[in-house]
């Protein structure tokens, strides 16, 4: 009797796990030709192709790293904190136009960038772009720009600026030198870091509670069907999605509690 073989197929998430990749890494790997396109209908990969592609995961990680790409707003904020200047989204576009930064992909129609590429940018190049945009305003920042440079919540900056009576010019802008002085205060920045941590814990818990309410609602509808108070059972797809979201929310909440981000 001939030996029977079981043919397996891989969906997107199964294929990503098979290669040791996250979903975003798989997407970039496909875009850049490091990972093959599906060879089975319905966006699936055959077991044969999956096995042949196993080495592609290492190539993807080597090229794109382990941190997911970010959009222009977050890229500007990351650079602002790094170079201590109020970098804006438009500055990111100028750096791309000058050939100093690569658009690694697009997400929902918007360009995204690798964080390690942002971290490798020459600080003087970034400074020149900001100076060209701001001109005579280069040595001052508004409250939003100050908060971005410090990597503080804006409410925290507004409070500290009020408490310290930081002077402003006729346009309501703060001296860049004063913002740099705040950045050098270790105890103050540790205080703000703890505030940010507590705010993150509260946000994570709110998200967790929201998903818990969805699961409880589904259970109530399920009970109603069991008790013949409802004609139709609740949608199983909805509870699967909700449980996945609850697992993710609790992982995020636990991570914030223990300082894992």
Image: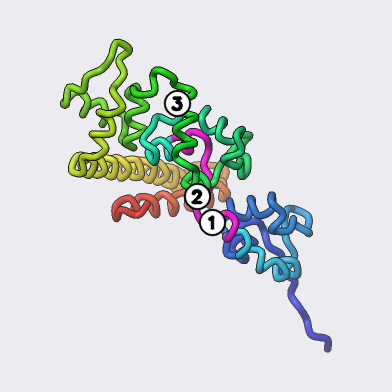
Q: Which mark is residue 137?
A: none
- Sequence-wise, the earlier of marks 3 and 2 is 2
State left or right for residue 148 relative to residue 164: right
**Disc 3 and disc 2: Cα gap in Å?**
23 Å
Q: Which mark is residue 116?
A: 2
**In what element is the residue under mark 3?**
helix
Quarter the N terminus occupies: bottom right
- Sequence-wise, the earlier of marks 2 and 1 is 1
Task: For label 1, count other residues whose C-alpha is less than 10 Å away and answer few (under 14), some (14-19) or many (20+).
Answer: some
Q: Residue at x 58, y 51 (%)?
A: 24
Reading the image, the residue beneath label 1 is: 65
Foreground tag (2 vs 1): 2
Residue 38 falls in image quadrant: bottom right
Foreground tag (3 vs 2): 3
**74 vs 176: above or below:** below
State yes or no: residue 65 in magenta. yes
**Disc 3 and disc 1: Cα gap in Å?**
31 Å
- Sequence-wise, the earlier of marks 3 and 1 is 1
Determine whether label 2 and label 1 are within 8 Å by CB: yes
Determine whether label 3 and label 2 are within 8 Å by CB: no
Reading the image, the residue beneath label 3 is: 131
Residue 49 falls in image quadrant: bottom right
**In what element is the residue under mark 2?**
helix
- Colour scheme employed for the rendering of this structure: rainbow
Q: Residue at x 28, y 29 (%)?
A: 177
Which stretch appears magenta? 62-76
Provide residue 181's location: percent of width, then percent of height.
Answer: 24, 34
**Disc 2 and disc 1: Cα gap in Å?**
8 Å
Task: For label 3, count other residues whose C-alpha is less than 10 Å away and answer few (under 14), some (14-19) or many (20+).
Answer: some
């Amino acid at each position: 009797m001939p030996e029977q073989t079981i043919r397996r197929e891989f969906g997107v998430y199964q294929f990503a796990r098979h290669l040791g990749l996250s979903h975003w890494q798989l997407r970039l790997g496909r875009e850049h030709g490091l990972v093959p396109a599906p060879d089975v209908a319905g966006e699936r990969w055959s077991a044969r192709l999956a096995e042949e592609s196993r080495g592609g995961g290492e190539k993807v990680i080597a090229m794109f790293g382990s941190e997911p790409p970010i959009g222009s707003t977050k890229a500007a904020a990351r650079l602002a904190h790094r170079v201590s200047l109020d970098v804006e989204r438009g500055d990111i576009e100028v750096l791309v136009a000058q050939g100093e930064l690569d658009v690694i992909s697009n997400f929902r129609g918007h360009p995204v960038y690798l964080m390690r590429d942002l971290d490798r940018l020459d600080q003087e190049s970034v400074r020149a772009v900001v100076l060209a945009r701001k001109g005579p305003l280069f040595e001052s920042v508004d409250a939003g720009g100050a908060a971005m440079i410090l990597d503080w919540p804006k409410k925290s900056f507004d409070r500290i600026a009020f408490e310290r009576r930081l002077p402003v010019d006729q346009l309501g802008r703060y001296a860049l030198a004063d913002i740099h002085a705040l950045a050098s205060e270790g105890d103050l920045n540790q205080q703000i870091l703890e505030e940010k941590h507590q705010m993150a814990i509260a946000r994570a818990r709110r998200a967790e509670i929201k998903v818990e309410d969805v699961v409880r609602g589904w259970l109530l509808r399920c009970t109603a069907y069991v008790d013949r108070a409802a004609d139709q059972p609740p949608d199983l797809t909805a509870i699967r999605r909700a449980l996945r979201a609850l697992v993710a929310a609790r992982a995020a909440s636990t991570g914030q509690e223990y300082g894992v981000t």
